[in-house]
């Protein structure tokens, strides 16, 4: 009998896990991959859509095109998870399997920031990025704030990238001098594990006239006065607010009793939850690495390798090492890279910075196209 694996969520983690199992095990595994959406979109594509660099339709990778022959994709919404029984209920029926992998990512809680929906824009969802794309062309003067409303949040460099791309966009339109850009981040530095990366970002902020407000979080927006209220009571007036909303584990995961302090705790080396045969990877966990696609993918690879070794009767492979490299947009088609190591020195992540260049911009494009080819055959 083939081992049955139920993968919940077809994002970075779910796609990598299913592809690897299918590639390596073929018929020896029966993978069912469930997602409520009909298409996958890279997180960084939201920035391309928002700044008009890509058309919304062109960044959608449809699950109907999945290139994984041994994976059954089901477009269904998961409504309940019984982790003990390794059984899930969806809007279309029920599924159970020998192994369950939760890769449901993080949801956004926009109402947790009063005023955000009325007076500002979140740009972390596709509809949010599309809405900003509509308003940007008519924004030509005043103050723009890129503000983080809660931590943890996906892709810690993304607020800084957004400020650089906004600066580039406004310069291209010849209106940069009429706009003040402020970035509000709840950390002391833009990328805390890598001082060299943070220094380069802060230096580029200064060069581009972008104001950095560290160690502060946006708690609400006042729609009447059009001010962002920070966690120390400071009020910053704005004309355009681009917000990173509060993140939460999907309600179905919380209701299943899988979370502690908001996220799913896992054994860091194996990604195992406290339920036998149930694993969790990516943004939905509190594994100790940032919420980023590259980390979700790395964790998924480790779970896949454990299952492959078990099914083939081989030795247990090495555990998750908490390392990954993230690309960072600096504007003007220049991309930098930070390689971060979260586990080697417990409690003290370290990072290595590679300066922005056109070559790294090409590497980032290749990163996207290799995933597109591997997962979607395109
Ligand atoms: C603006 C922006 C820029 C980013 N840039 C980068 C970058 O440059 N590099 C990088 O590595 N990361 C980047 N990220 C982060 C990256 O997108 C996420 O960290 C990554 O997608 C997480 O992978 P995951 O598999 O954990 O979850 P996801 O990719 O979010 O996948 C979760 C899936 O679960 C599905 N789902 C959720 N609930 C249900 C349900 N009840 N029923 C059915 N399906 C459900 C969702 O539809 C989704 O497809 C960026 C994110 C943003 C927003």
Image (cartoon, helix red, strand yellow):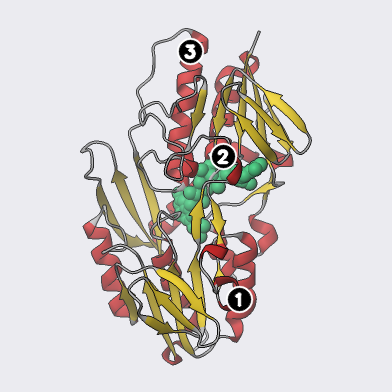
Q: Residues within 10 Å of mark 1 (few under 14, many from 20)?
A: few
- What percent of the width, then of the height, locates residue 266? 41, 32
Looking at the rendered structure, the secondary structure element under dot 2 is helix
**Where residue 253 is drawn, which disc sits there?**
2
Q: Quadrant of residue 121?
A: bottom right
- Going from the N terminus, do you reach mark 2 or mark 3 first? 2
**208 relative position to 158: left or right:** left
> Residue at 46% across / 37% down in the picture?
264
Categorize mark 2 by other alpha carbons within 10 Å: few (<14), some (14-19), many (20+). many
Residue on which disc 3 sits: 310
Dot 1 or dot 2: first in sequence order is 1
Residue 140 position (above or below residue 211): below
Query: Which label sits in the foreground, 3 or 1?
Result: 1
Q: Answer few, some or many: residues within 10 Å of disc 3's Cα (few below 14, many 20 plus, some between 14 and 19).
A: few
Distance between the alpha carbons at the discs numbered 3 and 1? 52 Å
Comparing labels 2 and 3, the label whose residue is closer to the camera:
2
Please state which of residues 308 and 378 is positioned toward the viewer in this rendering: 308
In this rendered view, identify the residue nearer to me: 158 or 92.
Answer: 92
Residue 251 position within the rendered picture, expressed as x and y whole percent measured from the top left: 59, 45
Q: Which mark is residue 118?
A: 1
Which quarter shows the N terminus?
top right
**Res 366 visible:** no
> Which SS class for mark 3?
helix
Residue appearing at x 42%, y 70% in the figure: 218
């Amino acid at each position: 009998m083939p081992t049955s694996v139920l993968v919940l969520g077809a994002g970075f983690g779910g796609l990598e896990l299913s592809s690897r199992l299918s590639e390596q095990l073929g018929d020896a595994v029966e993978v069912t991959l469930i997602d409520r959406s009909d298409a996958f979109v890279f997180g960084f594509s939201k920035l391309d859509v928002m700044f008009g660099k890509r058309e919304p339709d062109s960044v959608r990778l449809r699950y109907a095109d999945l290139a994984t022959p041994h994976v059954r994709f089901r477009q269904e919404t998961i409504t309940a998870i019984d982790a003990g029984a390794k059984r899930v209920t969806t809007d279309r029926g029920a599924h159970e399997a020998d192994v369950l992998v939760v890769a449901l990512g993080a949801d956004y809680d926009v109402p947790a920031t009063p005023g955000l929906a009325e007076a500002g824009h979140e740009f972390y969802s596709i509809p949010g990025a599309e809405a900003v794309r509509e308003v940007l062309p008519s924004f030509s003067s005043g103050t723009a704030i890129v503000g983080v409303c809660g931590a943890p949040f996906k892709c810690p460099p993304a607020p800084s990238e957004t400020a650089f791309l906004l600066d580039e966009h406004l310069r291209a339109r010849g209106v940069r001098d009429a706009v003040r850009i402020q970035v509000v981040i709840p950390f002391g530095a833009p990328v805390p594990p890598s001082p060299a990366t943070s220094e380069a970002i802060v230096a580029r902020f200064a060069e581009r006239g972008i104001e950095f407000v560290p160690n502060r979080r946006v708690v609400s927006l006042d729609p009447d006065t059009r001010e962002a209220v920070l966690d120390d009571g400071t009020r910053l007036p704005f004309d355009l607010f681009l917000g990173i909303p509060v993140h939460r584990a999907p309600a179905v995961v919380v209701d299943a009793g899988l979370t502690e302090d908001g996220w799913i705790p896992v054994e860091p080396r194996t990604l195992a939850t406290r339920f036998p045969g149930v694993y969790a990877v990516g943004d939905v966990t509190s594994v100790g690495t940032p919420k980023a696609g590259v980390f979700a993918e790395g964790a998924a690879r480790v779970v896949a390798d454990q299952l492959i070794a078990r099914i083939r009767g081989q030795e247990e492979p090495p555990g998750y090492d908490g390392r990954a490299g993230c690309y960072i947009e600096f504007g003007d088609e220049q991309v930098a890279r930070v390689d971060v190591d979260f586990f080697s020195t417990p409690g003290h992540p370290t990072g290595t910075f590679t300066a922005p260049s056109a070559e790294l911009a090409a590497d980032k494009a290749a990163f996207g196209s290799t995933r597109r080819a591997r997962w979607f055959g395109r």
